[in-house]
Amino acid sequence: VVTRRGLVAGGAVALLAGCGEEEQAVTAPADALLRQLAAEWALAAATARLPRGAPREAAGQVDLISTRARARAAEIARAVAAEGGRPQDAPEQPAERVAAEEALARAQAAIVAHVVALPSLHGRPLRSLGASLVVGAAGDTALLSDALGMPVDDPFPGTPR
Amino acid sequence: MNRREAIAAAALAALVAPAGARAQRSDIAVLIRLVAREEAAAEAYGSGAAVGVDRLYGDELDHAAALRTHLDALGRRPAPRGLDAPARKLLEAEDDEQLEAAIALESSLVDEYARALADIADPSVLQTAATILASHAQHLARMRGLAVA
């Protein structure tokens, strides 16, 4: 026999477990991942060519950073698809020759995108992916800023402004 | 509110409150662990370790202060715990071993924060921890760059 109390408690448990419509409306990992994907494609496009104003010797480092941004984008795209989203909603962007400041701004924006997404990434595998994206984007931002001669020095990179 | 809605609200509250308390306890435990790591790292860098990356000591102090702000809000003020193993190794390293010891310390901090992100419930604590993770990732990337240069 299922009592009224049991039914109510069961409904509450289902809601807490993320089965309720309200919970699903709040939680949209695929949407968060799409914003992360767009940020990495933007960084990859901005570093596909040596940015304007960048020292020539930065070319190798910039190229490596673009390659790693594309690799992170590919990983995010797989996660978007696994979450039922459409990676093509955040498509790869064509290479651009942007100013060095713009390239660095896009790198910093990628860290912000990964930090801001974390509360929407539920469960250990997605949080683990989120953490690895923060680490990758932050490390590359430091290396890019140094290569461009504009070293960033922030104890809390990725803080939304 | 009718009887059915009242029962539903009470049942939900009874379930949510323990879950919230559990999440808060988990966040407190993570914060205490991370504060100890930051304060140990600050002590190690503050001893004069020269590893070629600027502001390490100041960054660790800023991180510890930010984490302690969250703990204060949760009513907790843990006492300093002293050095952990990676920080002690850096503190005791000879000059030519300091960069390697600092890389090991930063690597352990990156791993610790990356694991912690899976356990943190409060969004504001999560954001603070994530930005500190980003900071340690930057320290580590720069140190590894110096090591191969």
Image (cartoon, coloured by chain):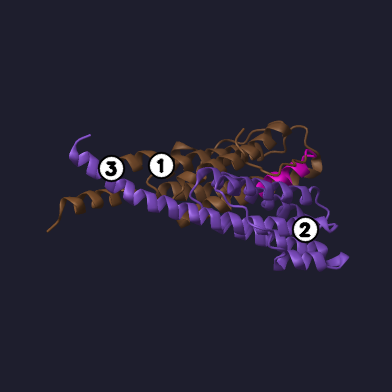
Chain colours: A brown, B purple
Q: Which residue is mark 3?
A: B9
Cα–Cα span, label 1 and label 3: 25 Å
Q: Residue furthest right?
A: B95
Q: Residues within 10 Å of mark 2 (few under 14, many from 20)?
A: many
Left or right of A70 on screen, residue A155: right
Q: Secondary structure at mark 2?
A: helix
Residue B72 position in % (x across, y down): 60, 47
Q: Give above or below for B103 relative to B73.
A: below
Q: Residues within 10 Å of mark 1 (few under 14, many from 20)?
A: some
- x 35%, y 43%: residue: A23
Dot in front, 3 or 2 = 3
Residues tagged 3 and 2 counted as in contact (Cβ below 8 A): no
Q: Secondary structure at mark 1?
A: loop
A140 in the magenta segment: yes
Amino acid type at circle 2 is: Glu
Residues tagged 1 and 3 counted as in contact (Cβ below 8 A): no
Q: Which residues are magenta?
A: A138-150
Magenta segment's dominant SS is: helix
Residues at marks 2 and 1, common chain?
A: no
Is residue A66 at least partly visible in the picture? Answer: yes
Cα–Cα span, label 3 and label 2: 50 Å
Amino acid type at circle 1 is: Ala
Q: Quadrant of residue B95?
A: bottom right
Q: Earlier in the sequence, mark 3 or mark 2?
A: 3
Left or right of B82 on screen, residue B49: right
Dot in front, 1 or 3 = 3
Residue A120 position in % (x across, y down): 46, 44
Mark 3, chain letter?
A: B
